[in-house]
Image: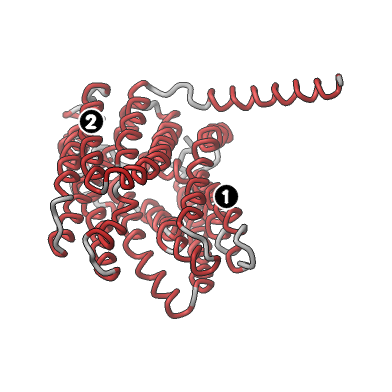
Amino acid sequence: MLKYLFRGFTFKLSMKNIYLKYISSFKGLSKEIWFLAFVTFINRAGTMVLPFLSRYLNEELKFTLEDVGIILSFFGVGSLVGHYLGGKLTDKIGFYNVMSRSLFTTGILFIALQFVTTFWALCFAVFFIMSIADMFRPALFVSLKAYSKPENQTRSLALIRLAINLGFIFGPMIGGLLIVSKGYDALFWIDGITCILATLLFVLLVKKKDLHSHSEKKEALSKDKNFRILQDKPYLVFLGISFLMGMIFMQLFFTMPTYHFKQFGLSEDYTGLLMLLNGVLIVLIEMPLVAWIEKKKFPHPKLFLYSSFLMGFSFVFLLFDNFWQILIFQMFVITVGEMISFPFTNTFAMNQAKKGYEGKYMAWYSISFSFAHILCPILSFAIIDKFGYKTNWSLTAIYGLIAMLLSVWLYRILKNKTTFTTD
């Protein structure tokens, strides 16, 4: 009896230690970062129409699947334009103005989207909405530098990612219930209202702050007025790594759902549960993992190397697809790979950015993922159609291998320059 009581006490003690370590990983973050995380959660939880947009276009508006695919492709193009414009505007008018105006305008546009029903009008509307909505992202990345101490910047991003994932967990779940009870119209209103609400919370809770003084920014821009990102060789290599990671990660959203059904006959709820596993792992593990990695002071290129290996290698498991449970293991491995590098890619990009050009640097960082967003479904589905899923998984693993080689090259470039830090 005493032995079982002792085991129970030891288990409770270990669980308490895990809980305390988890809580301690959040310490030291500024109140502005917590407010930004809260606003981001409200915004992402409210963006609940997006997972159901393909079904809305097909079932409610009666577009063919081919037309639906064309309309949705404008998301990627609009996102790319939005990231580029957001970066330029952030350097010109400041991240705070870009974030507040982008959020508010997106809310109005989401409400208006329900009244657009023709093909080309929807293509333009989707492109325009994403161009405005994704101006927010480069500005958000720059705001992390303004509101965080240098040593907390990576954990600040990890907290924002946690808020995004919590929003993605709750948003589709609430959206599904709304569609069943109130129909699709309610979703557009909720999406728009939550964007506007997020804007109000942002303005009320987050105090406006400039990353640099006007004189500092003017001096930096005049000193480097002929500077182009193409001159920054390490950053170009880094963008290549980010693009390849995006090509791997986007498989989860584009090709994996169809693979679940075609190979294993799994319905949409199983796909939803697997995506839920990704979000839950990030919520539970990422913050403590980031805190541990920061203490170990791994150079960023080494983290990109480890991450590229795990993300690419996770698709090797799918070459042995005799049982559907392999999907759980694959999701676990790719999520661990994602958590090792994704919070640190933002930190690396900001550390590499020249003063006065932070918006432009973060825009190109976001654009690297936008290119993956556009190219991944086109290339992957073409390969699947001609050669099958296993060929696509093999190519995806090769993306990881190339990203690993680029990470080694980046490490050597920075080591020779002796200028990179591990913050």
Q: Amino acid at mark 2?
A: Leu
- In the displayed structure, 151 sits above or below 332; it is above
Q: Which residue is mark 2?
A: 197
**Residue at the limit of the structure toward the bottom, as seen here:** 386
**Whole-percent x, y for residue 394 in the image:** 53, 70
> Tag 1, which secondary structure?
helix
The quarter in which the N terminus is drawn is top right
Determine the residue positioned at 30% across, 33% down. Answer: 143
- Foreground residue, 219 or 198? 198
Numbered circles on residues, count: 2
- Visible residue check, residue 365: yes
- Mark 1–mark 2 contact, CB under 8 Å? no
Asked which quadrant contains residue 71, the reply is bottom left
Marks 1 and 2: which is nearer the front?
2
- In the displayed structure, 9 sits above or below 144; it is above
Relative to residue 170, is residue 7 drawn left or right? Answer: right
Asked which quadrant contains residue 246, the reply is bottom left
Determine the residue positioned at 42% across, 45% down. Answer: 345
Q: Which residue is mark 1?
A: 332
Circle nearer the N terminus (1, 2): 2
- Visible residue check, residue 90: no
- Foreground residue, 317 or 256? 256
- Foreground residue, 180 or 349? 180
